[in-house]
Amino acid sequence: MKLHPVLEAVTQRIRERSAATRSAYLRRLDAAAARDRGADRLGCANVAHAFAGIAPDDRLRVVAERAPNLAIVNAYNDMLSAHAPYAGYPQVIKDEAHRLGAIAQVAAGVPAMCDGVTQGTAGMELSLFSRDVIAMATAVGLSHDVFDAAVLLGICDKIVPGLLIGALQFGHLPMVFVPAGPMPSGLSNSEKAKVREQAAQGRVGRKELLAAEEQAYHTQGTCTFYGTANSNQMLMEAMGLHVPGAAFVQPRDALREELTREAVRTALANLRARRWAPIGRIVDERCIVNAMAALVATGGSTNHLIHWVAVARAAGIVIDWDDFDRLSAAVPLLARVYPNGTADVNAFQAAGGPGYVIRELLDAGLMHEDVLTVRAGGLREFTRIPAWNEGRAGLQWRDPGASGDDSVLRPVGAPFSPTGGLKLLTGNLGRSVIKVSAVPEERHVVEAPARIFDSQEQLLAAFNGGELERDVVCVVRWQGPRANGMPELHKLTPPLAVLQGKGFRVALVTDGRMSGASGKVPAAIHVSPEAAAGGPLALLRDGDLVRLDARAGRLEALVDAQEWARRQPVEMTEAQREHNAHGTGRELFGGMRRHALAAEEGACTWL
């Protein structure tokens, strides 16, 4: 299939913009690849230290017999339901590596925080920056430099981008990402949202709300809505960095362990067959565009307009929100998964899952097929669904066929929308993004007076006090990377949804983030430059008329131009800065807040 002209143009624009930085990255990759293997290159004391902790037979195997050494980077903890299954994965990986004549070592355990636990608390102000901490922890683990390949264990919001950014610093190595799958469906996401809205109105108490939440989040596995964690998994498939079809197989499915073993086989096959698809070569501009196309085609998380900018930069590739916007205008919306539908990721998987989406996009010329992946068969392998027949044919893959449920997945020829799920907004309030796939069409344009808040707590207090019972654009500023680490403001969704449900024209405008579960309330988020960097949100005043127009792609304060030009930006108070600097470990992140780039530049702290 001929490549779609918009996809081709965006890719070429990225290629030209990135020529110098990508070339420099590949030169460093080639220089690292040209060295002798670590156990041969390092001094004797270094080698002895590297392998002192493993069994004597393994030391003999890796040093004398020159067996491959596979690094395991593990984001295991049992605070995250999605990561709790990883407890036993290292032993499975080591066992499979031994069976194949290799060894495996746990190179690093990286931190992994649960945004569901920290939503609305001071801990959420560490969340975005935890991505860069994870990247650094990954690099620290791999810096022992004795590994021939790696498998990376991670799923959730900041963890996969962090692992990928860290992995790309060792771009000469073959690497495979290993997911663990979603939890079985519990209370539906729409029912959960309903109870949250009832709680926001005081119609149910804490006991009822907690019971509903515990029914929704009830066992090991990822949360079942299509937020950032599950968007991560879709993007890993689209980039060819998983074993094909591994994303949404549940943790207790018999197939799950076999897919993990297949990840080991895949990493070592890359190494031994000298196909050499190292991760730094796989992640090129075409691979990044494929990820972006998959994101907009499925109505995925807005967080990736920050994270994938940072991932691309780690591979020497420069992308911006214009690229996402142009792709979203050309790539149709193929999936309806909560919050842009009622189905969860288990229903998405049953209807055909990532394999169906990738096949549809490839066949329509809306993804690059001529890319490297971790598999010899390239991206076409990722259009297939795995199955395990123990004692018979073993691990096999099949074509997903037609959609198993056209209320969840549709073909390119009959999409839910001819355009994707994301939109760039520009105007005198800066640049921002909106997830339009979850917002009803009649809510795509909101024009109303602004009510300015300096924190989400202020907005919640105003709601509880009955002060927002009207058409209103709620502006929450001082929420960007430099101000307080850019927390998600997901707790604002239920009260704003209540106001919208009463018939008011309501929107949110903020330099902060929303959750990957951004829902039915129109929200212009990631406003850049942020208020703390002198951005235009600091010029807004209570009562200013604000227009959010997702159809035209505009975000504007309807203020007389001369008056707008005369205004001086307000500044954060010293009390606000002091509050953001202390408690829950925020003291340790002061340097990151000071040096963070803008959201559209990935909010990176390492450039």
Image (cartoon, rainbow, N blue to C red):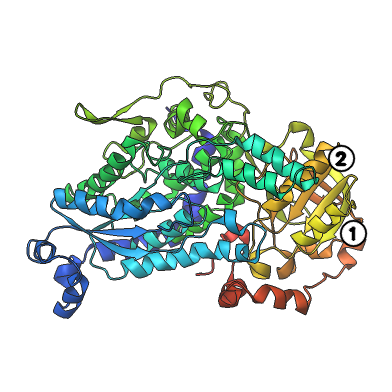
Q: Residue at (50%, 62%) from the top-left corner?
A: 131
Position in image of residue 447 (x %, y %): 86, 44
Instruction: Name the side, left or right, on which 338 lies relative to 247.
Output: right
Q: Which of 465 and 15 is in front in this view?
A: 465
Residue 565 picture quarter = bottom right
Going from the N terminus, do you reach mark 1 or mark 2 first? 2
| Residue 20 visible within the image | no
Say what amino acid the circle numbered 1 marks. Asp
Mark 1 touches mark 2? (CB < 8 Å): no
Nearer to us of marks 1 and 2 is 2
- Say if residue 88 shows up in the picture: yes
- Secondary structure under badge 2? loop
Residue kind at label 2, given as amino acid type: Phe
Asked where in the image residue 58 lies, by quadrant, the reply is bottom left
Nearer the observer, 264 or 219 = 219
Circle 2 is placed at which residue position?
Answer: 504
Residue 417 placement, left or right of 51? right
* Vertical arrangement, residue 367 with respect to residue 581, above or below: above
Crowd tier of the residue under label 1, counting other residues whose Cα lies within 10 Å: few below 14, some 14–19, many 20 or above: few
Seen from the viewer's position, the closer of residues 602 and 301 is 301
**View extreme (front): residue:** 207
- The local crowd at label 2, few if under 14, some if 14 to 19, many if 20 or more residues have their Cα within 10 Å, is some
Q: Where is residue 257 in the image (x, y as percent from the top left)?
A: 30, 42
- Residue at (79, 76) in percent of width and height: 573
Find residue 156 and report its horizontal and vertical position in percent: 49, 51
| Disc 1 to disc 2, C-alpha distance | 18 Å
The residue that label 1 is drawn on is 542
The correct choice, above or below, for 57 with respect to 441 in the image is: below
Which quadrant does the N terminus fall into?
Answer: top left
Q: Is mark 1 on a helix, strand or loop?
A: loop
